[in-house]
Amino acid sequence: MPFYEYRCSECGHEFEAMQKMSDQPLSDCPECGRAALVKLVSATGFRLKGGGWYETEFKGSGKSSTTDEAASGGGGCCGGSCACQ
């Protein structure tokens, strides 16, 4: 279940609440008891699990895509003949 951040517009109290996505937003502040909560927009954190992601496939390989491009004489969309590099 995701965490949502709330701020009371009356007293300024901020907190997080774990809720189902289908739950109605909270309205009553746990500090002052007034119905003045506003749901905040915040960055979410997530983790990609399973094979094929950065941590399982590329992390610690010692290779760099920029090193590989320099060795092959180009990169970008056209192999080095434009400003896309």
Image: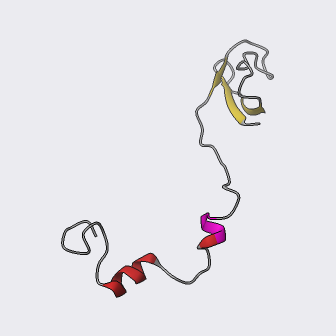
Vertical placement of residue 42 versus 76, above or below: above
Task: Spot the residue most to the bottom.
Answer: 71
Quarter-wise, where is residue 4 in the image? top right
Query: What is the x, y in percent for residue 50?
Result: 70, 60
**At x 58% / y 33%, what residue is drawn?**
41
> In the image, 31: left or right of 43?
right
Vertical placement of residue 42 versus 12, above or below: below
Quarter-wise, where is residue 60 in the image? bottom right
Query: What is the x, y in percent for residue 53?
Result: 61, 63
Query: What is the x, y in percent for residue 46?
Result: 67, 49
Residue nearer the viewer, 62 or 57: 57
**At x 44% / y 76%, what residue is drawn?**
65
**At x 79% / y 23%, what residue is drawn?**
31
Q: Which residues are magenta?
A: 52-56
In terms of secondary structure, what is the magenta stretch mainly? helix
Q: Quadrant of the C terminus?
A: bottom left
**At x 62% / y 71%, what residue is drawn?**
57
Q: Quadrant of the N terminus?
A: top right
Applied colour scheme: secondary structure
> In the image, 42: left or right of 32?
left
Residue nearer the viewer, 41 or 1: 1
**In magenta stretch: residue 38:** no
